[in-house]
Image (cartoon, coloured by chain):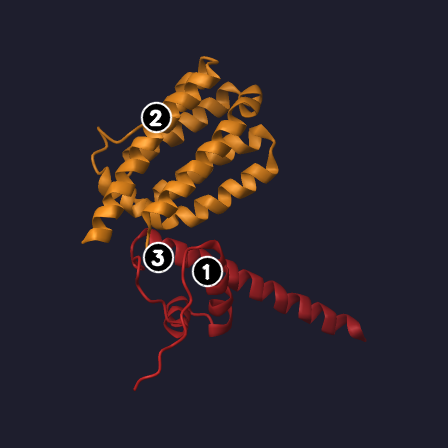
Chain colours: A red, B orange
Amino acid sequence: MRGPFVQQRRNDQQETEEARFLVVKKIREAILDETFKPVERLPEEQVGKMFSVSRSPVREVLLALEKEGTVVMEPIKEQP
Amino acid sequence: VKPLSPQEAMDIADLRLSLITLVARPAYRHLSPTDFDLGYGLAKQMTRTNNAKEYFEYDRRFWDIIFEKAQRPILWEVFRQLDDRLTRYNPLVLKLFPDQATRPRQREVLIEFLRKGEVDEAVRAFKKLYLEVVHRIVDHLKTEDVG
C-alpha cells in the first residue's frame, strides 16, 4: 500500500528540485541581462510571481545563492 | 543582488588562474584537434558577442572542454562554483570591453599556444591577458567605490 505514496513523494521531490533548478537558471539569466542589477533587492514574492513559482522554492534558491556569494539575504525592515 | 567588490574580483581571478595552471598540462595530454577547434570556436564567439548570456554560456562550454580533458573533477567543480559566482561580472566585462576588435583574446591565445604544444607559454600568455581584464574590472570597481 505504501507504493503509490512513496512514488507520489518522489514525484513531488522531483518537481521541487526542477522548480529550484529553473529558478536558479532564471535568476542567473536575469543577472546576466541586467534585469537584476548589483545592489538591487529581490523580494521573494516578486521573484516568485516573475517566474510563476511559489515563495518556498524561491527562498531555498536565494539561500543557496547567498551561500554561493551571489546575493545577500536581509530581514525585512519593519516600517516605523 | 550582492554588489561587486574589487577584492572579490581579485580573489576569484587568483583562484581561477591557479586552477587553470593546474589543469593545463593534464588537459593538454588529452585534447584532440577537434577539441582545439571547438575551444577556439567558442573563444572566437566570446570575442564577437556583446550578449552577456551568450558570453557566460560560451565561457562555461570552453572551460568544460579543458577541465573534462584534464580529468580533475574536484578542480572542475570548484572552477564551476567560481564561475557561478562570477555571473554578476559578465555584463561588466562586456561594458568595459565593448569593442570586439580590442577585446582581450586570452582564450584564443591559450588554444593557439596549446595547439603548438607550448603549454607553459599558453598559460603565461593567457595569464597576462586575463590579468589585464581583471585589473580593468578592479580599477572600475574601485572608482565606483570612491564615487
Q: Position of residue B110 (x, y in %)?
A: 41, 23
Does mark 3 fall on the same chain as mark 1?
yes
1 or 3: tag closer to the N-terminus: 3
Circle 3: is it few (<14), some (14-19), or many (20+) Cα within 10 Å? some
Is residue A30 in view? Answer: yes
Q: Decide: is B24 above or below B142.
A: above
Q: Which mark is residue B111?
A: none
Q: How many marks?
A: 3
Q: Of tags 2 and 3, which is closer to the observer?
A: 2
Q: Amino acid at mark 2?
A: Lys
What element does badge 3 sit on? helix
Q: Which mark is residue B128?
A: 2
The correct choice, above or below, for A80 with respect to B50 in the image is below
- The residue located at (38%, 47%) in the rendering is B8
Image-based side of B120 in relation to B128, left or right: right
Residue A69 in the image: above or below residue B69:
below
Marker disc for residue A66:
1
Question: Label 1 marks which chain's residue?
Answer: A
Q: Residues under labels 1 and 2: Cα distance?
A: 32 Å
**Residue B63 drawn above or below residue B25:** below
Check whether the beta carbons of the residues at disc 1 and disc 3 lie within 8 A of each other: no
